[in-house]
Amino acid sequence: MRPSQKDDRAQMLLATGVVLMMSLLSMAIFSIKLAGMSVPHEVASDAVIQTSQDVESVLPGLVEARAEVWYENGVSALESVTQAMDSSHEDLLHHGEISGIEVKLINVSITDLGSNQIQIDAELGVSDSDAMLM
C-alpha cells in the first residue's frame, strides 16, 4: 500500500472541473437567449386590435345591463353605474389574465348629466407580449 501524500492535485482538478462546467453553463444560457432574439415577430398577429374592438362593442351594453340590475334592486342610478363599471373592469382584468392579453380601463370618469342620463368616459389600454394599444 502506498503511503498517503498531502498535495493539492485533486483539489485543483476539482476546481478546474467546476470552472469548466460554470463556463459551459453560462455559454448555454447565452446561446438560449440569443436564439430567442432571432424568433421572428408575427406581423399577422392582431390580438390586441381584435380585443380592443371586442371591448368597444360589448362594454356599453354590458355596463348598461349590469347597471339596470343594480338600479332595479334599489341602488341609486349613479352608484349602480359605478358598480357596473367596476365589476366590468374586474371581469376585463380577469379575462386578460386568462387570455394573455392585458386589458385595462384607465381614467374612468362617471358624470350624472341629469334627466336619467349618465356619461362614462374611459381610456382603453390593451397589450400583449408583442403590441400595446392605448
Image (tube, helix red, strand yellow):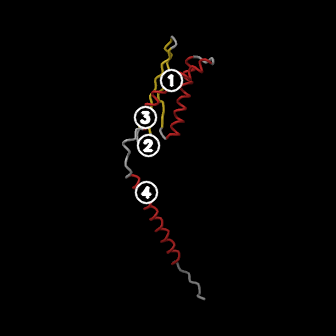
Question: Reading the chain from its start, which is encountered first: label 4 or label 3?
Answer: 4
Which amino acid type corresponds to the residue marked 3 in the rendered image?
Gln
Rounded to the nearest angstrom, the CA distance separating label 4 from label 3 is 32 Å
Residue 61: give x, y in percent of width and height. Answer: 50, 23
Q: Are marks 4 and 1 in contact (CB under 8 Å)?
A: no
Question: Reading the chain from its start, which is encountered first: label 2 or label 1?
Answer: 1
Question: Reading the chain from its start, which is encountered first: label 4 or label 1?
Answer: 4
State the residue at coordinates (49%, 41%): 100
State the residue at coordinates (45%, 58%): 29
Circle 1 is placed at which residue position? 61
Circle 4 is placed at which residue position? 32
Q: Nearer the viewer, mark 2 or mark 1?
A: 1
Q: 11 and 77: which one is in front?
A: 77
Q: SS for tag 1? A: helix
Q: Nearer the viewer, mark 2 or mark 3?
A: 3
Residue 78: give x, y in percent of width and height. Answer: 55, 18
Q: Quadrant of residue 81?
A: top right
